[in-house]
Amino acid sequence: MKKIQKLMERGCKILGSEYAILGGAMTWVSESNLVSAMCNNGIFGVLASGAMDGDLLKKEIEQTQAKTSKNFGVNLILANPKLQDLIDVCLEKKISHIILAGGIPDKSIMEKIHNGGAQVMSFAPSLAVAKRLFKQGLDSLILEGSEAGGHVGPVTTMILIQDILLNLPEYPIFVAGGILRGEVFASMLQLGALGCQLGTVFACCKESLAHPNFKKAFFRANGRNAVTPVQLDKKFPIAPVRALENIGTEEFIAKQREVLKKFENGEIALDNGRLSLEHFWAGALRRAVQEGDVERGSLMSGQIVEIIKEERSISEIVNTIMEEAERFLARNGL
Ligand SMILES: Cc1cc2nc3c(=O)[nH]c(=O)nc-3n(C[C@H](O)[C@H](O)[C@H](O)COP(=O)(O)O)c2cc1C
């Protein structure tokens, strides 16, 4: 057995996949075609549910199940008002893993999922939260550093590894954010991770149905272009969403300036000002992914975009990771 296969064993067992790699959920990107292609290529695909309701999610799950016989995960956003319905749909459709994102799940949600026969995965921004979640019955944790694409926490993968992964060797933990090369993947497993979750590289892979303009923007970009928005004033907090900078990024700063000025002049209430900033990016990810609006859409991307320069298939991506990992382990006599 290859060394990397041996290192992946525990992660593969938990995920039920050939490789200990999760294709992280990406709203509008991780739909049935991409997720089933991930599963059919041996990785653990995760369907994104974004702001879907139960009926939509049911359809998407059914379409995915029609294209693969492998199990896959479903990512649910905790703030979705339809959360309970979405959990019911996942359980009814015998989804093996539910990944709860966008907050810290409470015990009752985890119990409901367990009673329905699925595993719960979630995220933690600190060691204390990680410990609490595991105590409450979390099955496995994904540590996602701020290098990642999409909504991010304030702390990098490197810090989370040292704060959480290395302090909880007895618990199942996957690592995400800024990982692509096999050498780094193998190193994460040696540090005790069960596997890694990758997102950005799959957003622009061959099987992704994202608009060609969206993918081209990724291949042209450098890591420094994948930024979180500047926040002009603490009174108007801005969600930290990592995306490629474009005209929209500039306009968002101008919008904040305008709202701030109106607020200071007493022309707008705090809540309304906040709401207008929240609405600024509404629909922007869909416009970028589906319509190819790379100027004003949201090009959510991680800093790993630095080393993604061409469109590759999932199997090319995974085979490269495995070859690099195996070479690295052999070179270092590991
Ligand atoms: C376009 C895009 C959309 C994303 N949407 C979600 C989402 O809906 N839910 C979620 O938990 N993570 C989301 N993520 C994060 C990914 O699932 C994954 O954890 C992350 O991309 C991994 O880091 P990487 O981009 O450095 O590979 C998104 C990422 C991207 C690039």
Image (cartoon, helix red, strand yellow):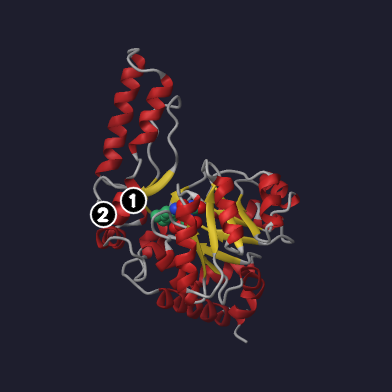
Which residue corresponds to mark 1?
Answer: 286
Tag 2: amino acid: Glu
Quadrant the N terminus occupies: bottom right
Question: What element does badge 2 sit on?
Answer: helix
Look at the numbered discs 1 and 2 and tell me whether their residues touch, using CB distance below 8 Å.
yes
**CA distance separating discs 1 and 2:** 7 Å
Question: What element does badge 1 sit on?
Answer: helix
- As drawn, 325 above or below 255: below
Which residue does the image show at 63% across and 45% down from the upper left? Answer: 105
Q: Residue furthest bottom?
A: 1
For label 2, count other residues whose C-alpha is less than 10 Å away and answer few (under 14), some (14-19) or many (20+): some
Q: Is residue 177 visible?
A: no
For label 1, count other residues whose C-alpha is less than 10 Å away and answer few (under 14), some (14-19) or many (20+): some
State the image coordinates of residue 64 (x, y, percent, origin top left).
46, 67
Closer to the N terminus: mark 1 or mark 2? 1
The foreground one among 224 and 110 is 110
Which residue does the image show at 42% across and 45% down from the upper left? Answer: 241
Which residue corresponds to mark 2?
Answer: 291
* Quarter holding residue 308: bottom left
Which residue does the image show at 40% across and 77% down from the upper left? Answer: 316
Which residue does the image show at 72% across and 52% down from the upper left? Answer: 134
Tag 1: amino acid: Arg
The foreground one among 307 and 249 is 249
